[in-house]
Image (cartoon, grey):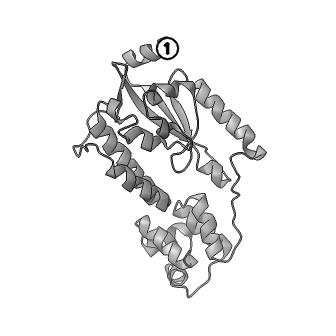
Amino acid sequence: MGDVGTLLRQWRGDRRLSQLQLSSRAGVSARHLSFVETGRARPTREMILRLAEELAVPLRARNALLLAGGFAPAFSETDLGSPDLAAVLASLRDVLAGHEPYPAVLVDRHWTMVDANAAIEVFTAGAAAELLEPPVNVLRLSLHPDGMAPRIRNLAQWRTHVLHRLDHQALASGDPALRDLHEELRALPGPLDDREPGGLVVPLRYDAGGTELSFFSVTSVLGTPRDVTLSELAVEAFLPADEQTARHLRRG
């Protein structure tokens, strides 16, 4: 972990903001921000949190900034198995169940499956057993040749979409594990499609036992998390992109 000034400068660079732009947004002078970034001034706890807010720094990284500045973390990090999270997780499971008969999965910051509804079997059927052993990484499952990839009919388009999204997530979060995952998935065999995608959304066209199903996905996160673990959970829900898919799934 570097000093707080260096870390703030890195986050500012990642967000492509000048010192003047950030200082104006945060209500501090550009001169003082320059002193903070070069180590000539020590920021207060409040300033670190204000700058982190303007930089849209994830809660985990905000704690790291505070520690680097000599302060205690501001946000708790609760284990998923803790009773403190039981009510929230129960509600999220209700969301998954309520999305049936369409597939939905709850994932953490590294795209590890935390939970899923029964309809997710439309994607997992036929995948190699080792890819379904916990912890299951849903992006690895989708792009691996022993996973979903052979049944994705628009694999080049979907693979390009997944890798592009993961690349942006790694940059936004500053998480090296996501960068490693991106490199791993990019090294898997499979085509890429550099053409500008047409249509309103990038579909997932999937072969389910000879029937082509078409989906688009919606990602939902908690709106006001104050806990690191909860801030990193997301529901990835798949919805039918055409009436044929909807009828097929409703029939079960």
Q: Is residue 46 above or below residue 210?
A: below
Q: Is residue 29 visible?
A: no
Crowd class of label 1 (few under 14; some 14 to 19; many from 20; radius 10 Å): few
Q: Nearer the viewer, residue 114 or 244?
A: 114
In the orientation shown, which residue stands out farthest toward the left?
195
Q: Which residue is mark 1?
A: 252
- Left or right, 48 with respect to 162, comes to right
Type of residue at label 1? Gly
- Left or right, 195 with respect to 211, comes to left
Count of marks, rendered view: 1
Q: Is residue 62 above or below residue 41?
A: above
Q: Position of residue 170 (x, y in %)?
A: 44, 57
Q: Nearer the viewer, residue 94 or 134?
A: 134
- Left or right, 3 with respect to 226, comes to left
Query: Which quadrant holds residue 142?
Result: top left
Q: Residue at x 37, y 41 (%)?
A: 143
Q: Position of residue 33 (x, y in %)?
A: 53, 79
Q: Residue at x 56, y 47 (%)?
A: 108
Q: Residue at x 66, y 76 (%)?
A: 44
In the orientation shown, which residue stands out farthest toward the top?
251
Query: Which quadrant holds residue 209?
Result: top left
Q: Residue at x 41, y 50 (%)?
A: 166
Quadrant where the N terminus sits is: bottom right
Q: Secondary structure at mark 1?
A: loop
Q: Is residue 62 above or below residue 197?
A: below
- Left or right, 46 with respect to 209, comes to right
Q: Nearer the viewer, residue 93 or 123?
A: 123
Q: Position of residue 227 (x, y in %)?
A: 68, 53
In the orientation shown, which residue stands out farthest toward the front?
129
Q: Position of residue 141 (x, y in %)?
A: 44, 39
Q: Is residue 41 visible?
A: yes
In the orientation shown, which residue stands out farthest toward the bottom?
40
